[in-house]
Image (spheres, coloured by chain):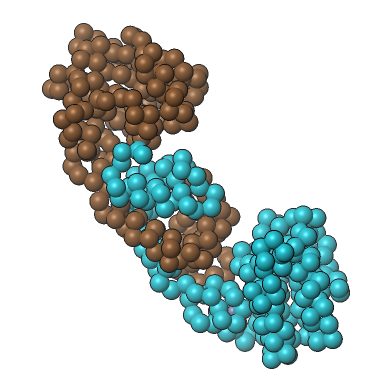
Chain colours: A brown, B cyan
Amino acid sequence: MTNAPREIENLIDLMARLPGLGPRSARRAVLYLIRKRGLLLAPLADAMHQVAVTARECVVCGNVSTSEVCDICTSEKRATGELCVVEDVADLWAMERASVFKGRYHVLGGTLSALDSMGPEELRIPKLVQRVVDEGITEVILALNATIDGQTTAHYIAEELEGRCAVTSLAQGVPIGGELDYLDDGTITAALKARKAL
Amino acid sequence: MTNAPREIENLIDLMARLPGLGPRSARRAVLYLIRKRGLLLAPLADAMHQVAVTARECVVCGNVSTSEVCDICTSEKRATGELCVVEDVADLWAMERASVFKGRYHVLGGTLSALDSMGPEELRIPKLVQRVVDEGITEVILALNATIDGQTTAHYIAEELEGRCAVTSLAQGVPIGGELDYLDDGTITAALKARKAL
Ligand SMILES: [Zn+2]
Ligand SMILES: [Zn+2]
């Protein structure tokens, strides 16, 4: 399409498949990488190879990890009896950036949705109930997006956990329709501190 | 910052240095890549490695290439006596997508600018004059961006080439202040066909 060498066309095609990059920004990115091939392209190739080889899902919580069980699940310091339920790893990272939650996580990998036909099993909800029992969890904090699907999922989980532990949710500061990963650290901190019982 | 494993943090940091990607879109892209590590991340690592090892600048025209002299400069079919001068390789690719120009290119790598202290030497303008003589060029088509710097550069080149060959520029269809790489193929075709003598 650009009459560039095959290797370069191939790289543009793959880059254009990244979220947020179309064909034009992929071409721009590839030209930028070629100009910085020693300083950026070669290190990026190595970093991608490293992650391709090592990245996996924590078998306990669903976090991304380079070991079977992630650092947070392994750390004894994080065994506070609190479990924070998030939709995806980007939300877990947003919570960690706020540095306010000291417990462990449970990553659903989505929300209950009729449209996507995601059921409780796909979202590891039975696994969550099992963890509450096995790990002696006293409080599950639902840090789900303030969307319809997020709130439907929150209510389903609250019902499943009824009588087993306290179930709270992030409250103050999460805007209606807002997504967690867009919030600043201060807002997340305020929302966690003002969490309310469901 | 995200408490992710070192390999993953490193990949996010490198991705965030790409044009058009900030920290947040870099995190999103990396999570997407991890989910698609077999289908996308590993091939992308390989493609980057391939390009890092093979990509270079054509010694004749400044195009990106995997050999010392690029395919366009090597192809006898492209020895039409016409040379198209572009600011960067993205513009060369835009011309090639339009499939209307059959000659060869000369990539300046920028424009004359007091601010960036880019002089004629950095822009390979002496090399352009030399090529006009050596390759028996009859027409130089200036396909520069319709910006102040682009037009300053066009006039400088026209003066340097005066009496050596015809010098024309893309005309009809290039919007004032517009950049070549944003134009559709039809506009580029029209502009080339309606080129005017400077
Ligand atoms: Zn874990
Ligand atoms: Zn060339």
How many numbered discs, if any?
A: 0
User: Residue at the location (13% across, 22% down)?
Assistant: A134
- Residue B142 at x, y = what percent? 76, 72
Q: Quadrant of the N terminus of chain B?
A: top left
Question: Is residue A125 in view?
Answer: no
User: Who is closer to the viewer here, A40 or B52?
Assistant: A40
Q: Is residue B32 left or right of residue B185?
A: left
User: Residue at the location (80% across, 55% down)?
Assistant: B176
Q: Identify the image quadrant of residue B108.
A: bottom right
Q: Identify the image quadrant of residue A161.
A: top left
- Residue A27 at x, y = what percent? 55, 59
User: Residue at the location (46% across, 28% down)?
Assistant: A184
- Residue B32 at x, y = what percent? 39, 44
Question: Is residue B178 in view?
Answer: yes
Q: Is residue A34 left or right of residue B104?
A: left
Query: Image height check: is B167 above or below B114?
Result: below
Q: Quadrant of the C terminus of chain B?
A: bottom right
Q: Residue furthest left?
A: A134
Q: Is residue A68 left or right of residue B176?
A: left
- Residue A71 at x, y = what percent? 22, 38
User: Residue at the location (61% across, 64% down)?
Assistant: B90
Q: Identify the image quadrant of residue A185.
A: top left
Query: Image height check: is B66 above or below A132?
Result: below
Query: Image height check: is A45 above or below A61?
Result: below
User: Who is closer to the viewer here, B154 or B89?
Assistant: B154
